[in-house]
Image (spheres, rainbow, N blue to C red):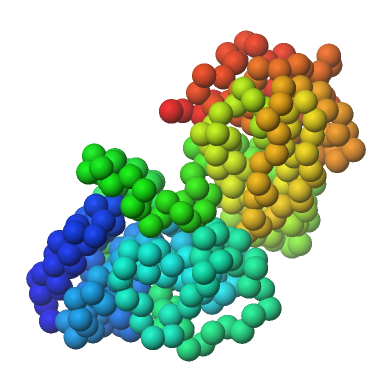
């Protein structure tokens, strides 16, 4: 089958999905489908979706729709990029659990043997990965290896499009799909809405790799014989000792911070955890009291927020002396009681829109989240 034939099949799927969900149909419009006979049925590298054209032509229309949607959701939810150093097959199985639940909720069929779990599929992929530690690999899963580290060798080269990364483009696609759904009066009919994955995926809006680099650079580490000629290019990160940076993170959950802002701030916690594999995060929620600590590593679930009272920053800074972090990151609107003296450790204030002006913070650096 030629590429135009594949595109005809894809166009048919888009039309059929439009009748089921404007949200899903919009996501498929943003996807680039590429023929490849190296993939069993369909796979994605996070940027493009690779489809075996002969297999696609042999499938019933609703099965093809489910297959394409499965891969597009993997790409849109950044399941390739978010894997990081985690074990490949278990991560793929966790991501399939999430996506298969969404495809089934859309009323589309799943292939025989597709992994399902009514409870786990409502969680984030990081949470599913953690919850399934020690389970069998599930070697019979139909789609257990559909997340690729790169394109198949028979795929045409990618265009050299300048600009945003694939993950940023998918974030925009998700936002547009929400808008199209809302304009069509489909509120409440989006199968993604009942899954925590999308809420957990509220993307970090700060470049945490850049923000944390300065603290990594001055933290004692064991280079273990790594060739120091590569240090200037940032290539020694994998050789860093995995205790090389401890970040104490406080999320303001007082009554002055609305739910949308709390979700944005929790998204920043995910950004900290995902910045480098060797960041250790100690999380507290805080209003006039501190709730925690939660010792988090990349891939761990973020606990549900606690709080709702007034705002007092002093309890967190008092606790910080016990943890001795390399950096304290306080995510807050800034309206509250500050300590009388600046702490010994560096402090980063991460402020949502509408928060206190920079001049109102008596110490530390202020980073602002954009709308």
Rendering coords of residue 360 (x, y %):
65, 11
Q: Is residue 313 left or right of residue 108?
A: right
Q: Is residue 36 left or right of residue 127?
A: left
Q: Tell me what residue is drawn at x 48 percent, y 78 percent.
A: 115
Q: Tell me what residue is drawn at x 48 percent, y 75 percent.
A: 116
For the question of whether residue 30 can be seen, the reply is no
Q: Tell me what residue is drawn at x 52 percent, y 53 percent.
A: 196
Quadrant for the C terminus, please.
top left
For the question of whether residue 337 can be seen, the reply is yes
Query: In this orientation, which residue lies closer to the viewer: 340 or 162?
Result: 340
Q: Is residue 173 left or right of residue 87?
A: left
Where on the picture, by quarter, is residue 241? Answer: bottom right
Rendering coords of residue 279 (x, y %):
69, 50
The answer to whether 197 is drawn above or below residue 347 in the figure is below
Q: Is residue 67 left or right of residue 168?
A: left
Q: Tell me what residue is drawn at x 19 percent, y 57 percent.
A: 18
How many numbered circles are shown? Answer: 0
Residue ranking furthest to the right: 322
The answer to whether 15 is drawn above or below residue 218 in the figure is below
Where on the picture, by quarter, is residue 323? Answer: top right
Where on the picture, by quarter, is residue 147? Answer: bottom left
The answer to whether 362 is drawn above or below residue 138 in the figure is above
Rendering coords of residue 47 (x, y %):
34, 59
Rendering coords of residue 206 (x, y %):
52, 36
Query: In this orientation, which residue lies closer to the viewer: 218 or 319?
Result: 319
Residue ranking furthest to the bottom: 140
The answer to whether 339 is drawn above or below residue 283 in the figure is above
């Amino acid at each position: 089958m030629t590429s135009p034939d594949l595109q005809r099949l894809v166009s048919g799927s888009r039309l059929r999905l439009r009748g089921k969900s404007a949200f899903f149909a919009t996501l498929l419009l943003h996807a680039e489908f590429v023929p490849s006979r190296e993939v069993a049925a369909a796979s994605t590298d996070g940027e493009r979706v690779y489809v075996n054209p002969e297999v696609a032509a042999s499938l019933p229309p609703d099965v093809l729709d489910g297959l394409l949607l499965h891969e597009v959701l993997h790409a849109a939810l950044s399941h390739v990029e978010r894997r990081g150093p985690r074990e490949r097959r278990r991560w793929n199985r966790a991501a399939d659990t999430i996506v298969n639940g969404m495809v089934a909720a859309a009323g589309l069929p799943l292939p025989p043997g597709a992994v399902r779990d009514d409870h786990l599929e409502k969680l984030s992929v990081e949470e599913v990965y953690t919850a399934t530690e020690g389970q069998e690999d599930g070697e019979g899963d139909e789609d257990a290896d559909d997340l690729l580290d790169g394109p198949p060798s028979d795929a045409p080269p990618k265009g050299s499009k300048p600009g945003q990364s694939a993950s940023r483009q998918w974030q925009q696609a998700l936002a547009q799909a929400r808008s199209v759904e809302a304009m069509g009066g489909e509120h409440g009919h989006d199968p993604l809405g009942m899954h925590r994955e999308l809420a957990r995926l509220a993307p970090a809006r700060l470049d945490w790799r850049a923000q944390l680099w300065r603290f990594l650079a001055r933290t004692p580490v064991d280079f273990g014989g790594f060739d120091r000629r590569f240090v200037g290019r940032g290539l020694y990160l994998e050789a860093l000792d995995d205790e090389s940076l401890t970040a104490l993170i406080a999320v303001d959950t007082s009554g002055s911070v609305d739910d949308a802002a709390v979700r944005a701030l929790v998204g920043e916690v995910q950004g900290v955890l995902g910045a480098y594999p060797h960041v250790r995060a100690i999380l507290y929620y805080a209003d006039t009291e501190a709730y925690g600590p939660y010792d988090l590593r990349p891939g761990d679930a973020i606990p549900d927020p606690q709080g709702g009272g007034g705002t007092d920053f002093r309890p967190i800074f008092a606790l910080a002396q016990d943890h001795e972090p390399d950096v304290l990151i306080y995510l807050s609107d800034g309206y509250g009681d500050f300590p009388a003296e600046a702490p010994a450790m560096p402090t980063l204030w991460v402020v949502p829109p509408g928060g206190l002006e920079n001049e109102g913070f008596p110490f530390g650096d202020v980073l602002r989240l954009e709308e």
